[in-house]
Image (spheres, rainbow, N blue to C red):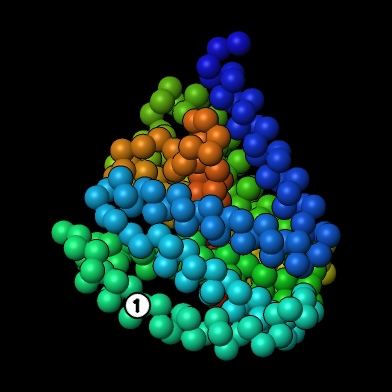
Amino acid sequence: MNDKMKNLLLRTFTGAVLVGAIFGTLFWSPAAFAALAAVILVGGMWEFYSLAGKQGAEPQRVLGITAGAALFVGSLCVFNFVHPVSDALNGVLPFALRYLLSVLPIMLILELFRGRSNPAANLGATVLGIVYVALPMSLIMFIPLLSVGEWEPLALLFVIFTVFANDVFAYLVGMTANAATGGRTHKLFERISPKKTWEGFVGGVAGAVAMGVVAAHVLSADAAVWTGLAVVTALASVAGDLVESMFKRAAGVKDSGRAIPGHGVFLDRFDALLLAVTFVFVYLTFFVENLK
């Protein structure tokens, strides 16, 4: 078996495991999915800080990850007010908020004693890890509540499927167009990702819109609003993939991590979703009444 086939099989296996984990936790309980989101948050932040380190920054990993965890726990406390998750969350919100309010000044003071050559880059990378990874993972639980007014796993699952549909259709249409034109396709963002094409981009958006229409039908929701949601998701997904590629290219690496040989487990798998979740959350706040 050659290396390409081994790589394909490994990617297929890890992808199947992740899809299984998403399915299982979503339909098990909100608490189970929250636990999976927490793992993605911590793993994704660790990988991001590793990429930042390869670019010369020295982020404050412990404070950054604990701040991301505090943001996540705080969001779960808010979620707990509108949907029961765990009694253990009662009373935790004030402590999470106090930590979040004090963590940035603590980072500034700590940087005084670290004696590093580029404190601004270190602090910037630390805070960016929170915004880039922890924020969307803290918002993701609210998507079903905003879309259908209750914890409906299918609503969140369709958003995730829309991300997948965009990726799959972009690949298939781009590959078909490349073969049909003898490689004379139009590059989307060659400086960051030489293989992405405008043809694939259009195909990805079309696939995402088709998934949005299916979602609206299954959820008995507004088709126009879900079509718009699909477009927002597709555009954000492409941007998310390009953003992670930008970070990896700057770091001089192919994969965001090494937990699995030849693969970044968290950022490589969820880069598109990270940006999509935040934009979808904002979009739903405008149309929440239409979606119910």
Residue beneath label 1, please?
A: 106
Q: Is residue 117 left or right of residue 280?
A: left
Residue at the left extreme? 117
Q: Nearer the viewer, residue 3 or 95?
A: 95
Residue at the (51%, 54%) spot, across then down: 44
Q: Determine the residue positioned at 37% across, 68% down.
A: 127
* Secondary structure state at the residue bearing disc 1: helix
Q: Position of residue 226 (x, y in %)?
A: 67, 67
* Residue 202 in the image, given as x and y percentages of width and height: 51, 47
Q: How many numbered discs sit on the rendered protein? A: 1
Residue closer to the observer: 283 or 187 = 283
Vertical order, 104 against 21 (above or below): below
Observer able to see residue 81 = yes
- Look at 48% across and 81% down and name the residue there: 99
Q: Is residue 35 left or right of residue 201?
A: right
Residue at image location 47% in from the left, 71% down from the top: 67
Quadrant the C terminus occupies: bottom right
Q: Is residue 149 left or right of residue 183?
A: right
Amino acid at circle 1: Ile
Residue 230 visible in the shown view: no
5 vs 163, nearest the viewer: 5
Q: Using a 10 Å C-alpha cutoff, classify the residue at mark 1 as few (fewer than 14 neighbours), some (14 to 19) or many (20 or more).
A: few
Q: Is 246 drawn above or below residue 154 in the view shown?
A: above
Residue that protrudes farthest toward the front in the picture: 113
Quarter of the figure that contains the N terminus: top right
- Where residue 251 sits, quadrant-wise, is top left
In percent of width and height, residue 78 lies at 65, 83
Against 245, residue 63 (above or below) is below
**What x and y, as percent, mark residue 5?**
59, 18
Name the outermost residue toward the top.
Answer: 1
